[in-house]
Image (tube, helix red, strand yellow):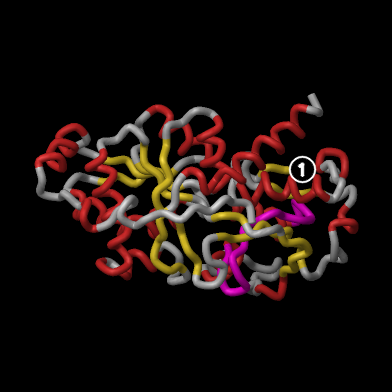
Amino acid sequence: MFTRRRALGLAALGGAAFIGAHGALAEDWRKAYPEIAFAVVPAENEAGVVNRWTPFATYLSQTLGVPVKLRIGNDYAAVIEGQRSGNILIGYYGAASFARALITGVRSEAFALNVNKVSGRGYYSVFYVLASSPYHKIADLKGKNLGLVDVNSTSGYQVPLFALHEMGIDADTYFANSLVTGSHENGIFALVAGTVDVAADSWNSPTYSNLTRMLTKKMLKHPDGTLMTQGDFRIILTSQQIINGPYTYLADLPPAMKADIRAAFFAAPTKVPDAFNRLSDGQNLPWQPVDNAAYDGIVKLIRFVDSLDRTKT
């Protein structure tokens, strides 16, 4: 698994003893930060992100006592640069984009981690092909078109390139084209349209993935207009498990503010179960505490993939 796990005491990361919602310190941070911008990476189209995240942002506003404004990044880099500039106080990253933020000097701290009911603290990168295609393994795809997500995507770029490297494959020379599609949904659309022959994507379990979400929303159809199913797709390669991306806040925020943010997050599964379950279509367990050290393995992975790119220039 691409992670280094370290046990954390709940008291250090958001125990009830730190909630100072009515104390002097809590009032002080609200004066300095009368509004909180909360940015998320674009795992799906903008309408889908707004629908999924707005109830939780509303809960945070009510609990923290200041407006929490949802910001949807145009790409993964937007969340990185938003925190670098200090405009984004809370960010939800993928593992690779958070590692990139740390590598490039963004002062951000991880505090909460998604935990899936099936895959736990992690997920996987997979290569999809259409089930109707003749492709059953990577060796069948030499000279074909590869679809990637975003250069800062863990499952849609960094891990796939690393996995190919481990197989002795240079994506730039092995495939006819390596196309960056811009989002997980776009990668699947490109596969269905025939623009790419294989697409890298994220996957938790047979019942929960980017693909299953798209199928549930009836976003994928055959040329004749009939709806596609999971049976229309085939996974030909699965990575090692990848640690889930973190929820983060700026390192320089007041300690009382950080404590209140943590407390609000960790109380959400009990206080607003509908809003919490909406974030994962009911597939996640309550968040677990996490810190930056858990992403040391991802940082090493990103540095390694960067070194591969430099050897080509």
Residue 10 position, x and y percent, is 34, 57
Residue 144 position, x and y percent, is 85, 50
Seen at 28% across and 69% down, the residue is 270
Q: Quadrant of the C terminus?
A: top right
Which residues fall within the magenta stretch? 194-209
Circle 1: residue type: Ser
Q: Quadrant of the N terminus?
A: bottom right
Q: Is residue 39 magenta?
A: no
Residue 189 appearing in the image = no
Corner quadrant of residue 27: top left
Residue 112 appearing in the image = yes
Of residue 16 and residue 241, the one placed in the foreground of this image is 16
Residue 114 position, x and y percent, is 46, 59
* Residue assigned mark 1: 178
Seen at 84% across and 57% down, the residue is 138
Question: Viewed as shown, does residue 38 lie left or right of 192?
Answer: left
Seen at 35% across and 44% down, the residue is 38
